[in-house]
Amino acid sequence: MTLPVVFWSTHIQHLLGYRAPEFPGSAWIPPVLGTIIFFYGGWVFIQGAWREIKAKLPGMMTLITLAITVAFLFSWSVDLGFIQAESLWWELATLVTIMLLGHWIEMRSIVQAQGALQELAKLLPDTATRVTEQGEEEVPVNELHEGDIVLVRPGENIPADGILHKGKSDVNEAMITGESIPVKKEEGDEVIAGTSNGEGSLRIEVTGTGEKTRLSGIMRLVAEAQSSKSRTQNLADRAAQFLTGAAVFAGLVTLIGWQLAGMPVDFTIVRVVTVLVIACPHALGLAVPLVVAISTTLGALSGLLVRDRLGLEEARNIDTVIFDKTGTLTLGEFRVIFMSTADDISEEEALMLAAGVEAESEHPIARGIIKTAQDRKIDIPRPEGFRALKGKGVAATIDGVEYHVGGPALLDAEKADVPSKLSEVSNKAADQGQTAIYLLRNGSVIAVFAVADAVRLESSEAVSELHKRGVEVAMLTGDSRAVAESVAKELGIDTVFAEVLPEDKAKKVRELQAAGKKVAMVGDGVNDAPALATADIGIAIGAGTDVAVEAGHIVLVKSDPRDIPRIITLSRAMYGKMIQNLWWAAGYNIVAIPLAAGVLAGWGILLTPAVGAVLMSASTVIVAVNAQLLRKIEL
């Protein structure tokens, strides 16, 4: 309807130098269609203005309604001969259309953000195959209970959180963790609801259904993030209210000023309409929501779940990051950190033999040695005659040769001497609070392994990236000073808090805050929750239903410490776009409103309502485009 209004507008015909076809009633095309556009297209703004006025909080809708209502009444006054001027039907029509476009863009961004929840919900299948003593049965997913065994065939999505009871397969967890490479799952491994099974057939014991699944926890966090309001959004809302007041005041001053100057009423009304049109703050309403919607989406795609937008916004000011050590900077599992061997045996062979001897042991240190061998893709031999040596270690025969693996107590029992080359490694391990484990062959020490909680490969890069951003890094741990200093030295950490009791972690956060630091706390356990809640920004490792997740502002789905500098990068980029958009949306009014009011009329410079509509719509388009540029940042 706007197109014919514009086409038959005398102003546009004169401007573009054409003549629209004339026929009986053609002169009434702009007023008739313009009236329909005002009531049909403008009704959403009129309703919004009524709600704002009832709430005594006039804002964007009030100003939009003022502009289109004044243009509507003015145009009919012209067409009915009460005022000698050009009617504003084409300006009214384009104004409503442009406003609706902006309104649609805003609603679309919100729907897209909510669509993330809908897409997450689609990951869960509607039914599951439950295995009972009587056989298999197809049941709705909401009828599953903890302890049930479900069959997941190749290519199906896993219906509930659980433990792999039987079978093995590669599971695609990209939709939950962002990790593109499928994860190998074997008996005893955890599986997550909504992830996609590969080519194997799995039987899974259900451990979490409905609201207790990790997927539901993620959906809840996304919903909370969408409903939370950032500080900059509050600033935008206040700016819109201020702009509404300023525009109304400027309109009144324009009306009174030109009437006192003796100008015709139609000239004065055109100036007032132009002021109200040009000040329309719809772009201001888009300035922050678009940026927030895009930034939270970018974060989710990168494995950063924003639970509270304010946390993401404040992350730009962080100057100190405290990491909990175990499970955050480290794996929380034993690994061989370094080793040394006798001259007649290679490190790979020694690790193969030690892992073979320990193959049937369930001790955490034994599992650490085995896992290290597996990480290095070493084939572990099958031991014979495995036996535990109580309090000393283990023994087994491999290829007809007996080997012993154990700690210092094993050396005493076997009366074995440690060669000087190997004792250097064991002394170094002791200095760093690590455990020295020895491999003996026929009573002689042939290798020593320093075993400790292994530092994540990603941790060093995370610390380095934080330093590049001017952020200090501290570490908080209950471990001994020697262990803590060893990890800190390896990673280049600035400050170490060692031997800290769980209940004292929050106290250390407050100490740094008292020194004027803006602190982010990164942790993964229940005992980290008070510190996460105390910090300026709480960042929880792992997207579950843990207390730590509930206390955090942001959750790292992939448990990757390198995501911490990415949070800061995203926060700084997001805030920069918000400020840019606020200026694009409102800053031009500093010049535009006085021009619309006619302060340069003496020099022949007057803005028409049409030009005002163009300027206003241009700011909306610029804000939308500028927000989309946020997608180009590299996290």
Image: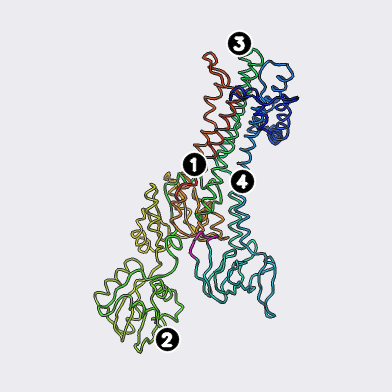
Asked which secondary structure carries label 3, the reply is loop
Q: How far apart are labels 3 and 2 at the CA level?
A: 107 Å
Asked which secondary structure carries label 2, the reply is strand
Q: Earlier in the sequence, mark 3 or mark 2?
A: 3
Sort mark 4 into few (<14), some (14-19) or many (20+) by Cα contacts within 10 Å. Answer: some
Asked which secondary structure carries label 1, the reply is helix
Q: How far apart are labels 1 and 3 at the CA level?
A: 45 Å
x and y percent of residue 41 in the render? 70, 35
Nearer-the-camera pick, 283 or 132: 283
Q: Is residue 587 above or below residue 469?
A: above
- Which residue has dot 4 on it? 110
Asked which secondary structure carries label 4, the reply is helix
Identified by mark 4, the residue type is Ile
- Which residue has dot 3 on it? 261
Identified by mark 2, the residue type is Arg
Q: How far apart are labels 4 and 1 at the CA level?
A: 19 Å
Label total for image:
4
